[in-house]
Image (cartoon, rainbow, N blue to C red):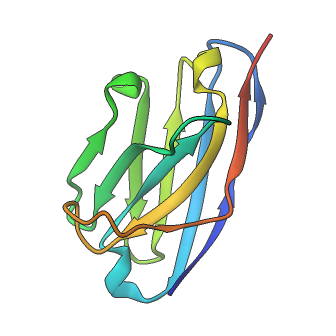
Amino acid sequence: QVQFVESGGGLVQPGGSLRLSCTASGDIRSTHVMGWSRQVPGKQRESVASITRSGISRYADSVKGRFTISRDNINDTVFLQMNSLEPGDTAVYYCDARWALSSSNYYYGHGTQVTVSS
């Protein structure tokens, strides 16, 4: 089991920035890969960005060049810097963790709302 403490969501205008933070605890084997997923009503949850303990990162095409993921391995904390936000980025963002990039067995946090609107 993995527990998460997420923070950083909110309301921002188009073109603005937000930074999400998430600290994980529990089964350390399941936090080799940490990241963020997002979901809007009526759509499937999608992975936005992931990063391994060794720093290998992956991004959804829709956020490449705008979002940057990083992590602090000592504290099992992952950050998502979101720049040039667009209304299409509005969603509930969930911190996630899994034991490998190839795994589809995710643990999820409770989520934090990000709203991009003028």
**In screen coordinates, is 35 left or right of 118?**
left
Identify the residue at horizontal 20%, vertical 64% (top origin). 54
Where is residue 13 shown, x and y percent of the image? 74, 16
Indicate whether 83 appears above or below 117.
Answer: below
Q: Is residue 41 visible?
A: yes
Identify the residue at horizontal 60%, vertical 41% (top origin). 19
Indicate whether 24 appears above or below 42.
Answer: below
Q: Quadrant of residue 21?
A: bottom right
Q: Nearer the viewer, residue 59 or 20?
A: 59
Where is residue 68 shown, x and y percent of the image? 40, 37
**In screen coordinates, is 37 left or right of 102?**
right
Q: Nearer the viewer, residue 98 or 7?
A: 98
Where is residue 95 shown, x and y percent of the image? 54, 58
Residue lying farthest front?
Answer: 42
**In screen coordinates, is 21 left or right of 73?**
right
Q: Quadrant of residue 46?
A: top left
Identify the residue at horizontal 77%, vertical 16% (top origin). 117
Where is residue 57 shown, x and y percent of the image? 26, 48
Q: Is residue 8 visible?
A: no
Identify the residue at horizontal 51%, vertical 38% (top origin). 81
- Image label count: 0
Q: Quadrant of residue 99?
A: bottom left
The C terminus is located in which quarter? top right
